[in-house]
Amino acid sequence: MARQGNRRASGRGFQGLLITLALHGGLFAAIAVANNREQPPLVISRDFVMAEMVKLGKPRDKFWLPRITQPQRSTAPPDSLKVAEDPNARAAPKEAPRPDDPTISKNLKRALDRARKLEQLAVPEEADEGSLTGSKLGTSNTETGDQYLAEVKGLLMQNYALPAGMAPGLVTTPPEIRFRLGEDGTLSDIELVKSSGNSFADDACVGAAQQTRKVSPPPPKYRNHGIGVECDK
Amino acid sequence: MRQVAGGLFLDGVSLSGAALTAFALIGSGAYARPALAQTGGDEDLPVIRLSGAGIELLRIGVPRPEGDTTSTVTAGDTLSKDLDVTGLFQVLDPASFPAALQSEGLGFSSPLWTQVGAQAVVKMRVAGGQIEARLYVTARGDTAQLSKVYRGADVRDAVHDFANDIVKSFTGQAGVFGSRIAIAMSGKGAHEIATVDMDGGRTAVVTKMASDCLLPAFSPGGGEIAFTSYLRNNPDLYIVSAGGGRARRVSKQPGLNTGAAWSPDGHTLALTMSYEGNAELYRINTEGGTQARLTSNPAIDSSPSFSPDGGQIAFVSNRQGSPQIFVMSAGGGGAKRVTFQGKYNQTPRFNPRADRSQIAFTGRDERGVFDVFILDVKSGKIDRVTQGKGSNLDPTWSPDGRLIAYVSSRGGLWVQNPETHHEVQIWRGSGSSPSWGPAPRR
């Protein structure tokens, strides 16, 4: 009887082992399938800084006809032009002070005085128009989200231009690019990761990053970090 | 069930800790790999979305065509001018092309043209009254995007056809080369009505009335031009064939018979008449019979323009003080003011494109300068077309609604693409009130 009970127990143990093996096998197969399945790209939603540039000046009369305001074209940050700068170079010798020439300095003084008076008399052809609460540099009135990426977006936008007259139907899906941000803010490894099917739209997207070339040095979290860009119309 | 180290034992079925963790991961969906793993990255990928792209002109190369010397010069010049007038292209200076590119023939090397900054290149071979033409896009390799032979009575006509196809390949809509603009030409003598090719290439005087002829209006079919003439010492309305010939008088009421606009079907004309004492808008048929009085107001109503569907008429009225643009039903009535900026707005012209709902007009700004503006009728928003370049007035739309022609105090007739603000002087003569005729038949 006891031998029969032992035999039954060992049979149940063997069955359990088989079920365990089958369950593990099934589980690892499920993991393998899940990992090989195509996943949608993970897009991190970020609220960029919403800034409004408000020029200081008298507001334009709303009953006047509008004027054309030219959009400002971008330029690379000034430090990107210092390609040949040598940090170990000797400082330029200071110019020896020249002896005062009373005649020249008197004439110069007179000329400067005259220029100053003329400047005061001159009426600007066109009064600055803007907002009475604005500033000469513009005012940022809202700040939410990632300020650095907002700055990058602003610079890219200045270089993002599509050919004129391109029919809207010619671009069905927006192209996407990627680039990497170097420690000094240089854009590198610019690549088209998703084509729109229209070479001009693709070129415009890649061109926005290529022409921007360099942005401000990124904060640590974006150093040598990939940035994706989707270029809609 | 009993707990064992690192796992669970369930009635003979054991699950290891690793397996349990795997179960938990699958259940929570946390197994999903970050997007960068797909593209070879190693961190979260912030995505910046750009929208509201700026607009740039497409850089296009027009190397000297091959073939007969005189015709090749005409063909090259005509095509360069055509592409410039569209306001879509920046025609590259041929002087910047290396000799290898000038002697390439109809063939094409994409890398070489990319080096000179060209995004597209057009090539022509002119021989025996026909043009063999190619369009290449550098980003699409060395295969021609357009390869066709064009024939025309004149080499310029053949080039215009090629230019229209080039525009179509980039915009999806053919160009309007070959169309003409009627203008009241002023010279040493009386004003006469003339037509000017839209590239300014040919000018033809249509009337020879030796009296002031003003305010021309091309018929929708392009066969006729309505205008006002003082031939019989009264501003009467006449219609003349666009090719010239004897003009017929269609309205000779005492007083004004001026500023005619054709209905889109070409059967009727709206115009200003004053035979009832005040300047009002009327609608007449093209044979001269009065059909309807459209306005009845003590103010002056003038300068009508039909909407593309023929259902509305834009006009100028000073009924609320200063001259402003109004829109009313084409049958008269329901007049509604549509401009509220500026104190002196006139010469409204509906965009012929039904999907645009735009009116171009001349406005006098706060400095007293006349310039061209575009009103979006639905939103009421006004955009400025010209600025800081003298006075610019009397706008007229191209038949495809993409371009605007106007006269300027700088002299002559100018064409601008309002999307790009690229403007070109197409004609150096002196004139007023241009009216752009329809696109040529193909």
Image (cartoon, rainbow, N blue to C red):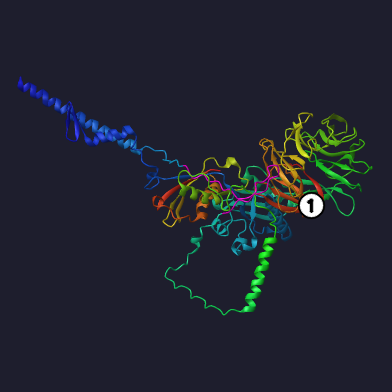
Q: Is residue B191 visible?
A: yes
Q: Position of residue B86 (x, y in %)?
A: 68, 49
Q: Residues within 10 Å of mark 1 (few under 14, many from 20)?
A: few
The residue nearer to you, when weighing B221 against B363, is B363
Q: Quadrant of the N terminus of chain A?
A: top left
Residue at position x 53%, y 50% from top? A203
Label 1 residue SS: loop
- Please provide the residue range marked out in magenta: A47-73
Q: Residue at x 70, y 61 (%)?
A: A121
The residue that mark 1 highlights is B202
Q: Position of residue A50 (x, y in %)?
A: 51, 44
| Residue B304 shows in this picture | no
| Label 1 chain ID | B
In the image, taking residue B323 as reference, residue B353 lies left or right, namely left
Locate residue B39 relative to residue B290 in the image: left or right: left
Question: Nearest the camera: A96 or A64?
Answer: A96
Is residue A72 on the magenta stretch?
yes
Q: Main secondary structure of the magenta part?
A: loop
> Front-most of B282 and A189?
B282
Which residue type carries mark 1?
Arg
Q: In the figure, B234 relative to B88: above or below?
A: above
Give the total number of marks visible in the rendering.
Answer: 1
The stretch drawn in magenta includes residue B333: no
Q: Tell me: B322 left or right of A181.
A: right
